[in-house]
Amino acid sequence: MTDAVGAGGAAGGAVPPPRLREFAAAVLRGQGQVTFLPSAAAGGVFCLALTAAGWEYGLYGLAGTAVGTVTARLLGAERDRVSLGLEGFNACLTALGLAAVLGPHHLSTALLALAGCVVVTVVTAAAGNLLGPLGLPSLTLPFCLTASAAAAAAPGFRRVWHQGGTPAALPRPAAGPTALGAEDLARGFLSGFAQIFLAPQWYVGALLLLGLLVASRRAAAVACLGNAAGIATAWALGAPAAGIAGGMAGYNAVLVALALCGVFLPARAATLAYALLGAAAATAAGPAVAALLAPSGVPVFTWPFVLTTLVFLAAARSFPRLGGS
Amino acid sequence: MTDAVGAGGAAGGAVPPPRLREFAAAVLRGQGQVTFLPSAAAGGVFCLALTAAGWEYGLYGLAGTAVGTVTARLLGAERDRVSLGLEGFNACLTALGLAAVLGPHHLSTALLALAGCVVVTVVTAAAGNLLGPLGLPSLTLPFCLTASAAAAAAPGFRRVWHQGGTPAALPRPAAGPTALGAEDLARGFLSGFAQIFLAPQWYVGALLLLGLLVASRRAAAVACLGNAAGIATAWALGAPAAGIAGGMAGYNAVLVALALCGVFLPARAATLAYALLGAAAATAAGPAVAALLAPSGVPVFTWPFVLTTLVFLAAARSFPRLGGS
Amino acid sequence: MTDAVGAGGAAGGAVPPPRLREFAAAVLRGQGQVTFLPSAAAGGVFCLALTAAGWEYGLYGLAGTAVGTVTARLLGAERDRVSLGLEGFNACLTALGLAAVLGPHHLSTALLALAGCVVVTVVTAAAGNLLGPLGLPSLTLPFCLTASAAAAAAPGFRRVWHQGGTPAALPRPAAGPTALGAEDLARGFLSGFAQIFLAPQWYVGALLLLGLLVASRRAAAVACLGNAAGIATAWALGAPAAGIAGGMAGYNAVLVALALCGVFLPARAATLAYALLGAAAATAAGPAVAALLAPSGVPVFTWPFVLTTLVFLAAARSFPRLGGS
C-alpha cells in the first residue's frame, strides 16, 4: 500500500519540523486505519469527506485521532503501533460516535469526547492484550465498547443529555416498502461507505470511496464487492428500502470484506468467497444487534462487523483452504 | 458406547456405495451427538422421534445435520470430527430452531435454515478454536449464538418474518398454579427430553429416551436423574405447573447431567452429585436467561445448559475429588 | 498489611480449639476481602457495620462467608486461598445481594442464599481458572454473575418472589436536581463505602471506613480518594443529587481505586493517577450498566467495578510507566 509519509508537508510553504510532520502523518494514518489503510493520503481524503458531512464532524474526527495518538504515546504504547495509526482509529470513531449520539454543538459533548478518547486508548490496550494471544485483532471493538457504554450511560447524566427522553425502546418489526429503485441502490451503495464513519450522506461516501481508491485499488474493489453483497443480502431478506438507501446494509459488509480478504487473511479467490459470506452474515446480524441493544437505547455502531469478523477469523484456522498462499 | 456404523445399510436390499454409507452414518451420528452420543442407532431413533413431532421437523433436522456435515467437509474440517458427527449436531438444532421460530412451511424459512447451517459450521469452528485451548467443549454454543442472532434479526426482515408483531416484551412475573399432579409430572418428564430438540410433545420425548437407551443405558439413567433434579428444583422454587408439564424444567438439566457425568467428567458418585447440582443450577438459570433475552424477543434455546456446563467444567479443575478415576 | 490472625480468640474467656479459631479467622478475612484486605480485624469491623444496617444483614453476610468457606474446603480448593478469605467474599456478597433483592425475612430467601453461596463457590473456581492464565483476578465477578442470574430468575419462581410485579423496565433519563449541598456530599461520601456491601446508610459506611483504617491507612486513603473522584465525576456529568447522596457514585470508584493502586498494581504516583481515571470511568459506567440491565430487572451490583478494573488491568501491561517499582 502506498503511504504518503510527507502528506502533511505539502500544505504550505513553511516546512514543519520533523517531529510534528511525523505526528501529523500518524494522525492521518489513524484516520486511514478505520478502513485498515495505514495511508496518510487516504486519511487526508477521509478527513475532507468528514468535513463535507459538516465541519464539526471533520474536527471531531481529526481531534479524536490526535488525542488517541497522543494518549497512547504518553502512556508508553509501542512506537510502531502509534506511528502506523493503530492507536488513532478507535479514538477517531469514539469522538464521532459521541458527537452523533449527544449532538456535536454542546461543550459537554466536546469534553466527553476528549475523555472518551483517553479511555478508549486504555480499552484498546486491554483488547489488544486479551485478543492478541488468541491471534485475533481488536478491530473497532474498543470503539464499540466505549461508545456503547457512553450512549447507554448518557441519559443518566443531566449535564450530558440534552434530548429529553431516551431512545430506549423495545424492538419493532420492520415496516415500509422493500422494492429498491435504481436511485435507492446508488444512494445506498455510496452511503454504505459513509456509515463507516457514522455519516448518512451519499456524497461523503463517494469521497470515502475515493480515499480507498487513492490508497489501494484492490482494497477499493473488495470494499465495493462487500458493499454489494451486503445490499443484496438485505434486499433478499426483505429489509425496508429506506434503510438500504441510507447505507445501513453496506457499512458492516464493507469492513468485513476488507478484513477477511486482504488484511487479516490473504487476498485470494477462496478468501474472497469467505469474505462475501461474512459480509452477508454481518448484514443479517445488523438487526439482531439492533434488537439486543434497542431496549437499552444503544445504537448498533460497528458491532456486527466486529462480532462477525472475530468469529470468521477464529474459524479460519480450521479451514486450510483459506490459509497463506 | 455402542456405535452401529452400518445402520444405514440395513434399510433396503440394495447396499449403497461405501462413501454414501459412511456419510449417512456421519449424519445419523450427528443427530445422536445432540445428546453426546456418537451413535448412528440413537441418531436414527431421534430422527423417527422428530418425524413423530411432524414430518417437517424430521426433515429439517436431518437436512440440517446433512448440510452442516457437508459444509464442514467442504471447508476442510478434520475428518475425525466430521465422521463422529461433531460437525452435524449444531446444524441440526439450528435448522430446527429456525423452523420453530419462523414457521417451517415458508420457503424463506427453508432457505434461511440452509444458510444458517452453513454459518453455524463457521461458528462451530470459531468456538472450537477459542474454547479448545481452555480445555472446554463448545457444546451447543454455536447453535445458541446462530439461532439467537437469527431470532433477534428476523422481525427486521419483511421477507422472513410472517407473524406480524415481534415477541419482544419486558419479562413478567410467573403466574398460574404451582401444584403438580401425577399427569403433569409424567408429561413434564417425557417432554423434558423432547424440548432438547425444541419439541413439546411427550411422545416425542418418549422416543428420544428410547434412543438414549438404545445407545447407552448409563447415559439414559444419568439423563433421567438430571431430568428429575430439574423438575424437583423447578417445583421447589415455585415454577408454574404448566411450564413444568411442558418440559421447560428438564431439558437443560438432562444435558447438564449428561455433560458433567460421563461425557466431559468421568462417571462416578462425586461427579454425579456435581452433575445434579449443575442440573439444579441450570434449571434455576432458565428464567434468568429468559428475562435477559425477552426484551429482544429471543427464545431461551439451550443457553442455560451451555452457560452452566461451561462454568461447572471450568471450575472442575479446582476440585480434585471430581478428577479422573 | 497487618493481619490479626488471633482476632477470634480475644472475644471470650474460653479459648476455642485451634481448628475452629482458624476457621473463624478465615471467615473474618473473607469479609475483609470484599475490600481486598486479608485482615480478620477489618472483617470483624465490617461485620459490626453490617449488623448496624440490620441484624439480618450481619447474619446473612457472616453466614454467607462461612458457607462459601466451608464449601470451598469440602470441594478441595487450595488451602491458602481458603485461609486468606479468598473463597469467602463472593459468598458474603451473594448472600447480602439475595437478601437485598428478595427480602431478608423470607425462609425462601435464606434457603436460596445458602444455595447461592454453594453455587458462587463453583463460579469462583471457574472464573479463577479462566482469568488466571490471562493474569487477571476474578474480583467480584462470581458474585455479580450469580446474584444477577438470581435476580433475573427470581420473578419466574412463585415460592421465591413475594413482591408482585417485577422491577424490569426500560431505562428512563435522569430526573431531579443536580446541585449538591454539604450534607449531600458528606452523606454520599460515607454511603459510598456502605454501598460496597449493598447498604445505603451513611453510618454503616462510617464503620466500614473505620475497618479500612484499622487494617491499612494507605488503603483507607486510596479508598477516600477514589470515592472523591467518583463523586466529582458524577457531579460534573450531572448525576441527580439524590443518587450521589445515596452513595451510588462512590462505591464502584472506591473498589476500582483500591484494586488499581496498591492491590494488583504497585502503589505509586502513576498508578494513583491511573486508578483515579479508572474510578471516574467506573462512575460514568454505572448508568450504562443500569441501562443494559434494567429491561431484565437486574440491579447494577458491582458490575461497573468488575468490568472497569478488568479492562484497566488488562491494559496496564502495555503501559510500562505503571509497572513494578
Image: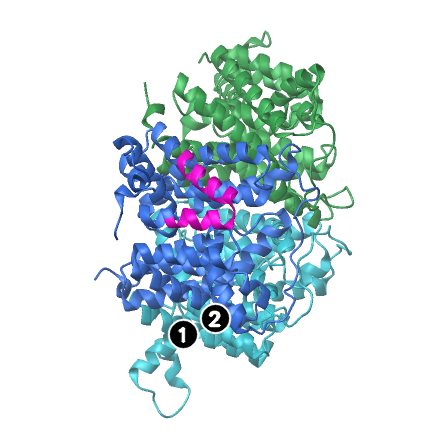
Chain colours: A blue, B cyan, C green
- Numbered-mark total: 2
Region of the chain picked out in magenta, as a range: A45-67
In which quadrant of the rendered view does residue B20 lie?
Answer: bottom left
- Name, please, the residue furthest toward the left: A325
The amino acid type of the residue labelled 2 equals: Ala
The amino acid type of the residue labelled 1 equals: Val
Q: Is the Cβ of the residue at disc 1 closer than 8 Å to that at disc 2?
A: no
Picture residue at 65% right of the left edge, 39% below the top: A155
Q: Is residue A58 magenta?
A: yes
Picture residue at 58% right of the left edge, 49% below the top: B280
Q: Residue C276 appears at what percent x and percent y?
A: 49, 23
Q: Is residue C233 above or below residue A101?
A: above
Which residue has dot 2 on it?
A232
Q: Identify which residue, A126 or B148, lies in the foreground.
A: A126
Query: 10 Å neighbourhood of mark 2: few (<14), some, or many (≥20)?
Result: some
Chain for disc number 1: B
The answer to whether residue B239 is visible is yes
Q: Identify which residue, A39 or C61, lies in the foreground.
A: A39
Which residue has dot 1 on it?
B27
- Please give left or right for residue C88 compared with residue C299 in the image: left
Disc 1 is placed on an element classified as helix
Q: Residue C290 appears at what percent x and percent y?
A: 62, 39
Q: Is residue A59 magenta?
A: yes
- Please give left or right for residue C73 compared with residue A260 in the image: right
